[in-house]
Each structure stands twice: as structure tokens, then as C-alpha cells.
Amino acid sequence: MDRRSIIKHAGIAGVLAAGVAPAVHAQAAVRWRLASSFPKPLDTIYGGAEVFANAVKAMSGGKFEISVHAGGELMPAMGVADGVQQGSVEMCHTVPYYFYGKNPAFALGSAIPFGLNSRQMNAWMMHGNGRKLMDEFYAGYGMMSFAGGNTGTQMGGWYRKEIKSVADLKGLKMRLGGGLVGEVMTKMGVVPQSLPGGEIYQALEKGTIDAAEWVGPYDDQKLGFNKVAPHYYYPGWWEGGPEVDFFVNQKAFDALSPENKAIVQAASSHAAVDMLAKYDARNPVALKQLIGAKIKLLPFTKDVLDASFKASQEVYAENDAKSPEWKKIYADFRNFQRDQVAWFRVAEGRFDSYMQTVKL
């Protein structure tokens, strides 16, 4: 009896009993490359891409593998979006505001000065119009986006000298993460510098820059900024809840099976939650250690915050005039934020402000 006859007469049970394996159309293996904008030593923000890639591999049974490459390994840290757009890599892990120079609307996919906090950003993206509007915009670059993490509200950076008033900002050479906050700071006399994370310490140590911001205590301590600039300010009003994103080449994503598309979505959600949880767990410990190392922890004065807010509104009005994409997305962003601020003022704000007054 030949193999074909066995299958015809015995059915699947007979096939298995006869030790003959049925033909199975196995899903083809998929291999992608991911370019990160971040240095490998930062297990929080760079590590988010590794968490994502590991989840993809596990959920696909090893059939879908993504190799993760640190900033500068495959392409410049600030060139990863170009790499995705051009198809040099299938995806990247980055902060959208890095690409503000292409179009101001990129910043709205991550953080703008005096914008949403991390929970509000997540709400806008998932249950407001955020992801829909941003992906409509990214489509013009042949990309789509998935949440890839959040840092929570960042710190205001490290300074060689105290910032007691707006006047102290005049002429200050400061590393800043995106072009938008650079435009705002320029209005207050700061000279913005754009540097990837791996180059900041050396510039601060040599005095090429006078101040620098990165994320918060855990990362900043790893990068050693406290050794070369003693004044640590808060809050980072330009990054109340910055979303870190995965940009994916649209053609590459469209070529995936439905199962692998679902895996990308699930893995990105896992990585996004994990990153914020890491920062929330690790920042308090790192801050206590930094204080123990005799840094000067200082709040920005109200006049600095007020001047920053005023300058931000001026930049937003300018962006409305020059970018229709910005104007459309920003209007929705602000409408959503008004309701969020009103709600957070009631329960979250009152609870948090009380808890900060009691001894635990």
C-alpha cells in the first residue's frame, strides 16, 4: 500500500498510527533588523527593544526573529527613521521628536513642552485619536508606529551653575533631545546642542556644553552626569510623558502573516508597559544614591516655568502657521489634554498631593 492510499483510506488517525507524517505548510521564518537610537549600556530605554525582540521570538516559537542594533551600529542614532523609510531596516526604536526637523508634527507622537503625562499619552494614543492621526502622518514616510515605551516625566537636566532666574539661561550651551524644545529654549537665550546619549558625558566633561538633559536618575547616574555637573533640576517640563516608539516599514509589515502582525502588536504593548515600570521602579533608588553623592537637587523657579510656557505657546502658534499636519494633530492633542488635566486635578492630583505630605 503506498503513502497516498494510506492517507485516503485511513484518515489522519491512520496516518499517525502508520507513522506517516501529513504534509504541513509551515510558516516561513522571518528575520528582521531593528536599529535603535539608544546606547546599549542603558538597559531601560535601549533594553525596551530587546524586551520586544525576545517576546516576538518566544510568541512565534522562534520563527520570527528580530536582531537589535544599538545607535551608531548600523546607522547614526538620529538616522534610524530614514533607515526604516528607505527599507534599509524593517524597523527602529526611537523617540519621534528626534525627527522634528522633517516636520514639527513628529514631536506630537512623543512629547511636547507642557504636554501629556505618560498615562494621558497612553490614553490619547489608544482611546483618543492619537495613534490614528500619527499613523496617517507617518504613512507619508512609508512607516507606521507602535508604542515602544515611556520614561514618565523626565528631569530637567544637569547644570554647571545654578539657574536662579531666566537671565541665567542666556548663552547657556545645552544638550536637548529634540528640535522643538530647542526652539523654545532659543527664545529664552539658550544655545541648543543636539547629541546622542552616548556622546553627552564627554561633551559635558570637556566643557563643550554647559548643561545636558537625558531622562532621569537611573539613566543619568549610569551615564555619570553627576560627576561633571552638580546641579540637578526638575521637572523636565518639555517631556511630561514622552512615548518611545517602534517605527515599522509599512511594506515589511504588510508582508507579515496575520499571526505575525498580531505578535508585533502584542510584543510592543508588553515592551511599552515594561519600560515605564522599570523607570518607576529604578528612578527612586537612583535618586537617593545621587543625593547621597551630594548633588544639588533643585526645582526650576516659577518664573522660569512661566517663561518656558509662554515661549512654548509662541512656538506652537508658529508651527500652526507652517505645518498643516502639526495644526491638525495639535488641535486634537490639546482638546484631549484639557479634559485630562481637569480629571487629573480631581482624583489623581488630590491623592498625590496629600500622599506627599504624610510620613509612611
Image: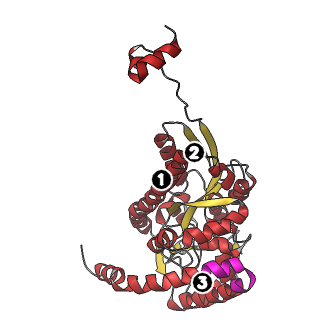
CA gap, disc 1 and disc 2 = 14 Å
Residue 111, image x, y percentages: 57, 73
Which quadrant does the C terminus fall into? Answer: bottom left
Q: Which residue is mark 3?
A: 331
Q: Looking at the rendering, which quadrant does residue 172 occupy?
A: bottom right
Indicate left or right for 33 with 345 as reference: right
Residue 39, image x, y percentages: 60, 54
Magenta segment: does it hold 329?
yes
Name the residue rendered at 48%, 46% in the picture. 55
Which residues, given as a range, are shown in magenta?
319-331
Q: What's under tag 2, amino acid-wise?
A: Ser
Predominant secondary structure in magenta?
helix
Q: Which residue is mark 1?
A: 266
Mark 1, residues whose alpha carbon is within 10 Å: few (<14), some, or many (≥20)? Answer: some
Mark identifier at residue 257: 2
Direction top: furthest residue: 1
Residue 126 in view of the camera: yes
Q: What's under tag 1, amino acid-wise?
A: Ala
